[in-house]
Amino acid sequence: MSYKTTKITDFQADSSRKNGAKEKQVDSSLYPKRDFRGSKVQVTNSFAVQFSYVSQFLQYAFKKSDKPRISRQEYVNHLGLTRRHAEAMCSMAVAFDLVIPNKLTITPVGKSMAEGDPYLEFTGTLWILHYNVASNKKWLIWNTLFNEVFPTRQKITSEEARESFNGLRERLSKFTMNKKVRREIAVILDSYTTKSFNKLGIIQKEDIEYIFQKTDQIPPEILTATTLVFRQRHDPNASGVSMETLIKAPNSPGRILNMEESTVRRIFDQANHKGLLFIERKADLDQIRFREGITVETLLEMYYEGLKK
């Protein structure tokens, strides 16, 4: 099957510039200087995040799930893409936790999605994909935007988003800053305003500004799944996670999904009522504990099954 290649180019200059209006300056020192060893600047290689491609990629990985490894060339041949575009698709699929790095074979999460949501169109699926990439420090630009920039700004222009990465200029080449960083920001903002991630409503564009919107409802299975991902990354042996951590900590569900404390608590109460987890309440500490046998995959399966009713 052949597709037309779509790329996102740099943003045009903001209309405020064209009109001679004075631009607000962003103090890049507001954002912590981070150790980005092992991080990757781009997830997308400047290609648009198009779920028509991602779903075809995932279905091929699912079809070949008996193979120990799938080469990039196989994806090139199957999808009819250029090698550079196919490599971008591989990078996206890894960042979304749909395929295993290097082997490019399907993950358990990818398998659940391929079976339950083959076109990757349900909002619960999109929330998991969003959380997987935005909460992972490996994906430098995506993670910094959702973990540091938007939570502290709430409203920002594309120019201000770019300026928030000025602290990297001493560590990255001029080409990387002017091309890769710029284009990755453009792709991400486009993904949440004009592409499939816009179903989440977490970023709204008004004139030249991008507004980080509060999330007031997420299926309890999906919030529980993001909580499991958070625990697996930060303390896989922990028997529980404090509510405060899940609401406020860096890369936590509350932070990446932009949820008020009252919203997080309400949805966890729903999850508790459904038997997805336990809420252990003590004098000054609420803690989430997980039920035996609950995994991200089983939670996705519950979510998809619930959509059929």
Image: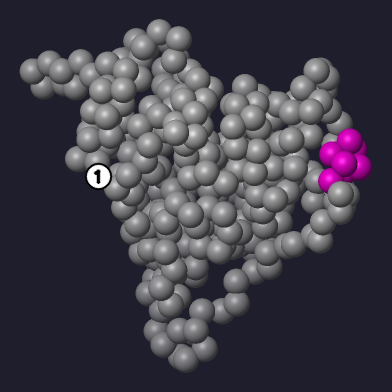
User: Per the image, is 228 magenta?
Assistant: no
Image quadrant occupied by the C terminus: top left
Quarter of the figure with residue 274: top left
Q: In terms of depth relative to the viewer, which is nearer, 104 or 169?
A: 104
Q: Magenta part of the protein: which range?
A: 73-79
Q: Is residue 74 magenta?
A: yes
Question: Which residue is nearer to you in this view: 130 or 63?
Answer: 63
Residue 211 x/y as whole percent:
38, 63
User: Residue 41 at what x, y percent from top left?
Assistant: 62, 47
Residue at (86, 53) in percent of width and height? 2
Measured as percent of width and height from the top left, residue 43 is found at 65, 46
- Which residue is labeled 1 in the image? 260
Task: Using the image as rendered, state which of residue 32 and residue 252 is in the foreground.
Answer: 252
Q: Quadrant of residue 157?
A: bottom left
Question: Position of 92 compared to 132: left or right?
Answer: right
At x 44%, y 27%, the residue is: 225
Mainly helix, strand or loop, the magenta region? helix
Kindly indicate the quadrant of the structure image that contains residue 27: bottom left
Above or below, 96 against 176 in this view is above
Q: Is residue 304 visible?
A: yes
Q: Is residue 28 above or below residue 146?
A: below
